[in-house]
Amino acid sequence: MKPSRLRLAVLISGSGRNLQAMIDAVGAGTLAADLVGVIANRADAYGLERAKRAGIPVQVIPHTAFAAREAFDAALGTALDALAVDVVALAGFMRILGAPLVERFQGRMLNIHPSLLPLYPGLHTHQRALDAGDAQSGATVHYVTPTLDAGPAILQGSVAIHPGDTAASLAERVMSEVEQHIYVEVLRWCADGRLRLHNGNVWLDGRERGAPLRWPALH
Ligand code: GRF
């Protein structure tokens, strides 16, 4: 069943360039979603300004205001329920969410991670790719499961590592050439009713995909 318009909430902690790509795609009419809310765990997240400029309701739920992770997760869950979201997109959201919240949004919570998962879950991904002498780096959009950066991978794109690259130059290239394209692409599949998680596996267009899809060569 194709949902009419996807109700999408985005969780951020920082600059919000992935969020901006979503805002631009919705504005251009190439992503049939309504950005119903942007929630940040930090009041200084620049992505909040991007959201406000686009007229999207914002909320700050500071993790520091809660004594325990469970209480923070519960507040987040309440906010997401109030927005009646179909899909939650973690986009540079730097908090680990507990299993109860993640499981409640199973198959409806996505994350983008700046590496070619399963390589380099966690932090400092581009530096780790450089240190390992890798020829490529990239990014992956995946379903969120309770294990950090380990949920089923949906779509991946890569860039070549150039001589002289630093973690910063690589991060910038992966952002502009991969991240800002693949997240919107996956959200389009959600909005068009083409993507689902079934028994822990990614299904696109009625076919189970054993390995992450590759962007831009998808099929
Ligand atoms: C991105 O590289 C994302 O993959 C990582 O954090 C960065 C966030 O960037 N998890 P932005 O907030 O979307 O600009």
Image (tube, rainbow, N blue to C red):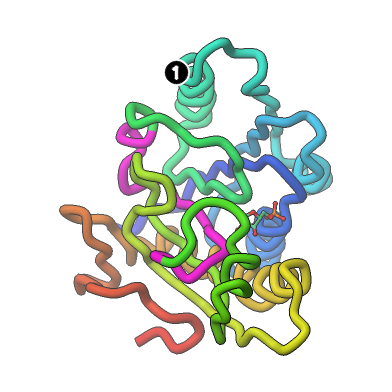
Q: Residue furthest left?
A: 199
State the residue in front, 69 or 110.
69
Residue 133 appearing in the image: yes
Residue carrying label 1 = 70
| In this rendering, position of residue 148 left or right of residue 25 | left
Please report the residue visible at 61 percent of the width from the left and 72 percent of the height from the top.
Answer: 131
Residue 52 appearing in the image: no
Can you give x and y, in whole percent of width and height, for residue 47 in the image?
76, 45
Label 1: how many residues lie within 10 Å, few (<14), some (14-19) or many (20+)?
Answer: some
Q: Quadrant of the C terminus?
A: bottom left
Segment tinted magenta in the rendering? 102-118
Please report the residue visible at 29 percent of the width from the left and 58 percent of the height from the top.
Answer: 196
**Number of callouts:** 1
Please report the residue visible at 63 percent of the width from the left and 49 percent of the height from the top.
Answer: 92
Q: Quadrant of the N terminus?
A: bottom left
| In this rendering, position of residue 200 left or right of residue 188 | left
State the residue in front, 191 or 98.
98
